[in-house]
Image (cartoon, rainbow, N blue to C red):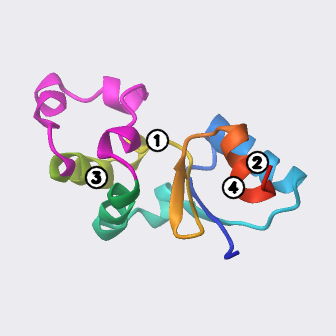
Amino acid sequence: MSTPIIYGIPNCDTIKKTFTWFKANKIDFIFHNYKTDGIAIAKLKAWCKYADWQLLLNKKSSTWRNTDPATQSSITTQAAAIKLMQLHTSLIKRPVIECNNGILIGYNEADLEKQFLKK
């Protein structure tokens, strides 16, 4: 198994919970910080091959709520969502975990156990 990559921002409570889970289960990981490293459009497109763009776009975030209504209503396609997520990485649901040629979106302990502990 290749080393999983956790994508997010370090001050996010969900990311902190994810780090705690990985450390408690003694699973090494790489962290990709959106705030310092950004995210490539190619990476977002690749993720959309595994999951619908609507799962990646975090419409519950304060960043989304603070986005003007005209912009919100214009996000009706994968291309539009990717462009906005690349510009405002806080709009990407956290965490996104790349593992074994796939991704997990959001913190779900059962999914983590199934993927990494084979329960």
* Residue pointed to by mark 1: 93
* Residue pointed to by mark 4: 115
- Percent x, y of residue 40: 34, 67
Q: CA distance from mark 3 to mark 4?
A: 30 Å
Identify the residue shown where x is 66% and y is 44%: 111
* Residue pointed to by mark 2: 113
Question: Mark 4: which secondary structure?
Answer: helix
In the rendered image, the vertical position of residue 39 relative to residue 82, given as above or below? below
Q: Which numbered circle lies on residue 87?
A: 3
Question: Mark 2: which secondary structure?
Answer: helix
Q: CA distance from mark 3 to mark 1?
A: 14 Å
Q: Amino acid at mark 1?
A: Lys
Q: What's drawn in magenta, residue-wise?
A: 51-78
Number of other residues with Cα within 10 Å of mark 3, as a class: few under 14, some 14 to 19, many 20 or more: some
- Percent x, y of residue 61: 43, 29
First in residue order: circle 1 vs circle 4: 1
- Cβ–Cβ below 8 Å for labels 2 and 4? yes
